[in-house]
Image (cartoon, rainbow, N blue to C red):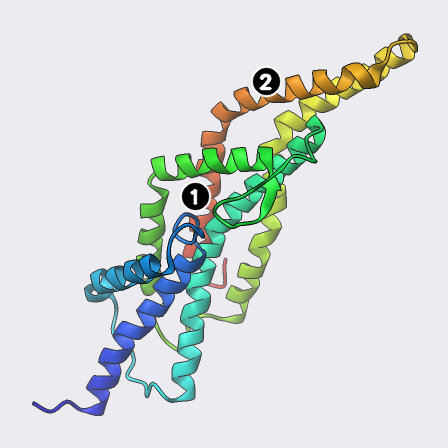
Protein backbone atom coordinates (compact mmCIF):
# COMPACT_ATOMS: atom_id res chain seq x y z
CA UNK A 1 0.00 0.00 0.00
CA UNK A 2 1.38 3.37 -1.03
CA UNK A 3 0.65 6.63 0.75
CA UNK A 4 0.75 10.04 -0.85
CA UNK A 5 2.80 12.92 0.53
CA UNK A 6 -0.41 14.70 1.55
CA UNK A 7 -1.54 11.75 3.67
CA UNK A 8 1.85 11.44 5.35
CA UNK A 9 1.97 15.19 6.11
CA UNK A 10 -1.56 15.07 7.54
CA UNK A 11 -0.79 12.10 9.79
CA UNK A 12 2.45 13.64 11.02
CA UNK A 13 0.80 17.00 11.71
CA UNK A 14 -2.19 15.45 13.48
CA UNK A 15 0.21 13.87 15.98
CA UNK A 16 3.10 16.31 16.34
CA UNK A 17 1.20 19.61 16.60
CA UNK A 18 -1.38 18.51 19.21
CA UNK A 19 1.46 16.92 21.18
CA UNK A 20 3.37 20.22 21.06
CA UNK A 21 0.40 22.16 22.47
CA UNK A 22 -0.31 19.60 25.20
CA UNK A 23 3.36 19.22 26.20
CA UNK A 24 3.78 23.01 26.42
CA UNK A 25 0.73 23.26 28.67
CA UNK A 26 1.95 20.48 30.97
CA UNK A 27 5.38 22.11 31.20
CA UNK A 28 4.04 25.25 32.88
CA UNK A 29 0.63 24.36 34.34
CA UNK A 30 0.22 24.14 38.13
CA UNK A 31 0.81 20.70 39.68
CA UNK A 32 1.61 19.14 36.27
CA UNK A 33 4.57 21.45 35.76
CA UNK A 34 5.96 21.22 39.30
CA UNK A 35 9.64 20.44 39.68
CA UNK A 36 8.78 17.33 41.69
CA UNK A 37 7.06 15.85 38.59
CA UNK A 38 9.74 14.11 36.47
CA UNK A 39 10.15 15.23 32.88
CA UNK A 40 9.64 11.65 31.69
CA UNK A 41 6.26 11.52 33.48
CA UNK A 42 5.19 14.75 31.77
CA UNK A 43 6.18 13.41 28.35
CA UNK A 44 4.28 10.17 28.93
CA UNK A 45 1.25 12.14 30.11
CA UNK A 46 1.44 14.39 27.03
CA UNK A 47 1.62 11.35 24.73
CA UNK A 48 -1.36 9.71 26.46
CA UNK A 49 -3.47 12.88 26.27
CA UNK A 50 -2.53 13.33 22.61
CA UNK A 51 -3.55 9.76 21.84
CA UNK A 52 -6.85 10.18 23.73
CA UNK A 53 -7.91 13.48 22.12
CA UNK A 54 -6.69 12.56 18.63
CA UNK A 55 -10.11 11.30 17.41
CA UNK A 56 -11.77 14.51 18.68
CA UNK A 57 -9.54 16.92 16.78
CA UNK A 58 -10.58 18.71 13.59
CA UNK A 59 -8.82 18.07 10.31
CA UNK A 60 -5.17 19.14 10.36
CA UNK A 61 -3.88 20.95 7.25
CA UNK A 62 -1.47 19.01 5.07
CA UNK A 63 1.70 21.12 5.27
CA UNK A 64 5.26 20.11 4.52
CA UNK A 65 6.89 19.65 7.97
CA UNK A 66 10.11 21.24 6.69
CA UNK A 67 8.42 24.40 5.42
CA UNK A 68 8.27 27.79 7.15
CA UNK A 69 4.50 27.42 7.61
CA UNK A 70 5.09 24.24 9.64
CA UNK A 71 7.60 26.07 11.85
CA UNK A 72 5.09 28.89 12.47
CA UNK A 73 2.35 26.41 13.34
CA UNK A 74 4.68 24.62 15.78
CA UNK A 75 5.56 27.90 17.48
CA UNK A 76 1.90 28.85 17.71
CA UNK A 77 1.04 25.52 19.32
CA UNK A 78 3.74 26.15 21.90
CA UNK A 79 2.39 29.64 22.60
CA UNK A 80 -1.19 28.37 22.97
CA UNK A 81 -0.13 25.58 25.32
CA UNK A 82 2.01 27.93 27.40
CA UNK A 83 -0.83 30.46 27.54
CA UNK A 84 -3.26 27.85 28.90
CA UNK A 85 -0.82 26.79 31.61
CA UNK A 86 0.20 30.39 32.30
CA UNK A 87 -3.41 31.43 32.94
CA UNK A 88 -3.70 29.01 35.86
CA UNK A 89 -0.15 29.59 37.05
CA UNK A 90 -1.17 33.21 37.60
CA UNK A 91 -3.67 32.03 40.24
CA UNK A 92 -0.89 30.67 42.43
CA UNK A 93 1.29 33.73 41.76
CA UNK A 94 -1.67 35.85 42.90
CA UNK A 95 -1.84 33.96 46.18
CA UNK A 96 1.92 34.35 46.71
CA UNK A 97 1.56 38.13 46.32
CA UNK A 98 -1.44 38.12 48.67
CA UNK A 99 0.61 36.18 51.22
CA UNK A 100 3.49 38.65 50.85
CA UNK A 101 1.16 41.59 51.51
CA UNK A 102 -0.33 39.85 54.55
CA UNK A 103 3.10 38.85 55.89
CA UNK A 104 4.39 42.42 55.60
CA UNK A 105 1.47 43.66 57.70
CA UNK A 106 2.02 40.93 60.30
CA UNK A 107 5.74 41.64 60.52
CA UNK A 108 6.68 38.33 58.90
CA UNK A 109 8.02 39.77 55.68
CA UNK A 110 11.43 38.34 56.53
CA UNK A 111 10.10 34.77 56.93
CA UNK A 112 10.84 32.92 53.69
CA UNK A 113 10.80 29.28 52.61
CA UNK A 114 11.52 27.35 49.43
CA UNK A 115 8.52 26.54 47.26
CA UNK A 116 8.91 22.83 46.39
CA UNK A 117 6.88 23.26 43.17
CA UNK A 118 9.03 25.98 41.63
CA UNK A 119 12.22 25.85 43.70
CA UNK A 120 12.16 29.57 44.54
CA UNK A 121 12.03 31.43 47.86
CA UNK A 122 8.52 32.63 48.76
CA UNK A 123 6.93 34.13 51.91
CA UNK A 124 5.72 31.58 54.46
CA UNK A 125 2.19 33.02 54.40
CA UNK A 126 2.22 32.94 50.60
CA UNK A 127 3.22 29.26 50.64
CA UNK A 128 0.40 28.60 53.11
CA UNK A 129 -2.06 30.14 50.66
CA UNK A 130 -0.57 28.12 47.80
CA UNK A 131 -0.89 24.81 49.69
CA UNK A 132 -4.52 25.52 50.58
CA UNK A 133 -5.26 26.64 47.00
CA UNK A 134 -3.63 23.49 45.59
CA UNK A 135 -5.88 21.29 47.73
CA UNK A 136 -8.92 23.33 46.69
CA UNK A 137 -7.83 23.17 43.04
CA UNK A 138 -7.75 19.37 43.18
CA UNK A 139 -10.96 19.15 45.23
CA UNK A 140 -12.78 21.32 42.67
CA UNK A 141 -11.50 19.10 39.83
CA UNK A 142 -9.52 22.01 38.45
CA UNK A 143 -7.06 19.61 36.82
CA UNK A 144 -9.93 18.00 34.89
CA UNK A 145 -11.30 21.42 33.92
CA UNK A 146 -7.84 22.35 32.66
CA UNK A 147 -7.72 19.27 30.43
CA UNK A 148 -11.25 19.99 29.17
CA UNK A 149 -10.29 23.57 28.26
CA UNK A 150 -7.20 22.23 26.52
CA UNK A 151 -9.29 19.85 24.40
CA UNK A 152 -11.85 22.59 23.65
CA UNK A 153 -9.03 24.88 22.53
CA UNK A 154 -8.53 22.69 19.46
CA UNK A 155 -12.04 23.74 18.37
CA UNK A 156 -11.76 27.47 19.17
CA UNK A 157 -8.10 27.60 18.09
CA UNK A 158 -7.74 24.97 15.35
CA UNK A 159 -4.29 24.05 14.19
CA UNK A 160 -3.32 26.44 11.41
CA UNK A 161 -1.13 29.38 10.51
CA UNK A 162 -3.75 32.01 11.44
CA UNK A 163 -5.07 30.57 14.72
CA UNK A 164 -3.73 33.44 16.88
CA UNK A 165 -4.01 37.13 16.06
CA UNK A 166 -2.41 40.30 17.38
CA UNK A 167 -5.24 40.93 19.85
CA UNK A 168 -4.83 37.44 21.28
CA UNK A 169 -1.17 38.09 22.08
CA UNK A 170 -2.16 41.41 23.65
CA UNK A 171 -4.81 39.66 25.77
CA UNK A 172 -2.22 37.12 26.99
CA UNK A 173 0.13 39.95 27.98
CA UNK A 174 -2.65 41.73 29.89
CA UNK A 175 -3.48 38.66 31.97
CA UNK A 176 -0.64 39.55 34.31
CA UNK A 177 -2.25 42.86 35.25
CA UNK A 178 -5.14 41.01 36.93
CA UNK A 179 -2.71 39.29 39.25
CA UNK A 180 -2.13 42.35 41.45
CA UNK A 181 -5.77 43.40 41.76
CA UNK A 182 -6.81 39.83 42.60
CA UNK A 183 -4.03 39.59 45.19
CA UNK A 184 -5.30 42.75 46.91
CA UNK A 185 -8.83 41.31 47.03
CA UNK A 186 -7.55 38.08 48.63
CA UNK A 187 -5.39 39.88 51.20
CA UNK A 188 -7.79 42.79 51.84
CA UNK A 189 -9.42 41.41 55.05
CA UNK A 190 -6.04 40.80 56.69
CA UNK A 191 -4.58 44.11 55.50
CA UNK A 192 -7.61 46.10 56.71
CA UNK A 193 -7.67 44.39 60.11
CA UNK A 194 -3.95 44.88 60.72
CA UNK A 195 -4.26 48.51 59.61
CA UNK A 196 -6.98 49.09 62.23
CA UNK A 197 -4.73 47.56 64.89
CA UNK A 198 -1.84 49.82 63.89
CA UNK A 199 -4.15 52.85 64.01
CA UNK A 200 -5.29 51.86 67.50
CA UNK A 201 -1.66 51.56 68.59
CA UNK A 202 -1.08 55.06 67.25
CA UNK A 203 -3.94 56.38 69.39
CA UNK A 204 -2.59 54.52 72.44
CA UNK A 205 0.91 55.90 71.93
CA UNK A 206 -0.49 59.44 71.85
CA UNK A 207 -2.59 58.97 74.97
CA UNK A 208 0.04 57.00 76.93
CA UNK A 209 3.53 57.97 75.70
CA UNK A 210 5.21 55.96 78.47
CA UNK A 211 3.85 52.71 77.02
CA UNK A 212 6.35 50.79 74.86
CA UNK A 213 4.13 50.38 71.81
CA UNK A 214 6.86 48.76 69.72
CA UNK A 215 7.40 46.06 72.33
CA UNK A 216 3.70 45.29 72.65
CA UNK A 217 2.63 45.94 69.07
CA UNK A 218 4.61 43.19 67.31
CA UNK A 219 3.28 40.18 69.29
CA UNK A 220 -0.27 41.58 69.21
CA UNK A 221 -0.11 42.17 65.44
CA UNK A 222 1.42 38.74 64.88
CA UNK A 223 -1.24 37.00 66.98
CA UNK A 224 -4.04 38.89 65.29
CA UNK A 225 -2.60 38.02 61.89
CA UNK A 226 -2.73 34.30 62.65
CA UNK A 227 -6.30 34.62 63.93
CA UNK A 228 -7.28 36.41 60.70
CA UNK A 229 -5.63 33.67 58.63
CA UNK A 230 -7.75 31.04 60.40
CA UNK A 231 -10.94 32.89 59.47
CA UNK A 232 -9.64 33.76 55.98
CA UNK A 233 -9.37 30.09 54.99
CA UNK A 234 -13.16 29.74 54.98
CA UNK A 235 -13.37 32.65 52.53
CA UNK A 236 -10.61 31.28 50.29
CA UNK A 237 -12.82 28.67 48.60
CA UNK A 238 -15.12 31.11 46.72
CA UNK A 239 -12.12 33.29 45.84
CA UNK A 240 -10.19 30.35 44.36
CA UNK A 241 -13.32 29.27 42.47
CA UNK A 242 -13.63 32.79 41.05
CA UNK A 243 -9.96 32.87 40.06
CA UNK A 244 -10.13 29.47 38.35
CA UNK A 245 -13.30 30.32 36.43
CA UNK A 246 -11.84 33.67 35.37
CA UNK A 247 -8.63 32.03 34.14
CA UNK A 248 -10.48 29.35 32.17
CA UNK A 249 -12.83 31.95 30.68
CA UNK A 250 -9.83 33.98 29.53
CA UNK A 251 -8.40 30.94 27.77
CA UNK A 252 -11.72 30.20 26.07
CA UNK A 253 -11.73 33.74 24.62
CA UNK A 254 -8.47 33.19 22.77
CA UNK A 255 -9.09 33.12 19.06
CA UNK A 256 -11.65 35.91 19.42
CA UNK A 257 -9.16 38.65 20.19
CA UNK A 258 -9.42 37.95 23.92
CA UNK A 259 -12.77 39.75 23.97
Q: Considering the numbered disc 2 on the image, is that residue within a helix, a strand or a loop?
A: helix
Which residue is rendered at x = 37% and y = 43% of the image? 142
Q: Nearer the viewer, mark 1 or mark 2?
A: 2
* For residue 192, above or below residue 135: above
Q: Is residue 191 above or below residue 60?
A: above
65 displayed left or right of 106: left
Mark carried by residue 207: none
Is 20 left or right of 234, judged from the image as shown? left
Residue to which mark 2 is pinned: 227
**Residue at figure coordinates x 83%, y 15% from the top left:** 213
Q: Position of residue 9 (x, y in %)?
A: 26, 84
**Do the CB atoms of the residues marked 1 and 2 lie less than 8 Å apart?**
no
Residue 163, position in %: x, y? Answer: 41, 71
* Front-most of residues 8 and 258: 8
Residue 226 appears in which quarter of the rendering? Answer: top right
The residue nearer to you, when weighing 243 against 259, is 243
Q: Decide: is 71 above or below 191.
A: below
Q: Which residue is mark 1?
A: 245
Residue found 33% across the figure and 40% down from its top: 141
Q: How many marks?
A: 2
Amino acid sequence: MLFTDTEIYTWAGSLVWPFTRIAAMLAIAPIFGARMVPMRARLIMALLLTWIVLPLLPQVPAIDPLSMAAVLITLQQMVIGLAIGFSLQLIFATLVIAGQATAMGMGLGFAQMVDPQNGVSVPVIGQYYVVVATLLFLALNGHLALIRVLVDSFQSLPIGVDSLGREDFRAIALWGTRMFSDAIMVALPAIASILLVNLSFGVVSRSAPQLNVFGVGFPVTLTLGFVILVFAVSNLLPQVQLLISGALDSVSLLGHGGQ
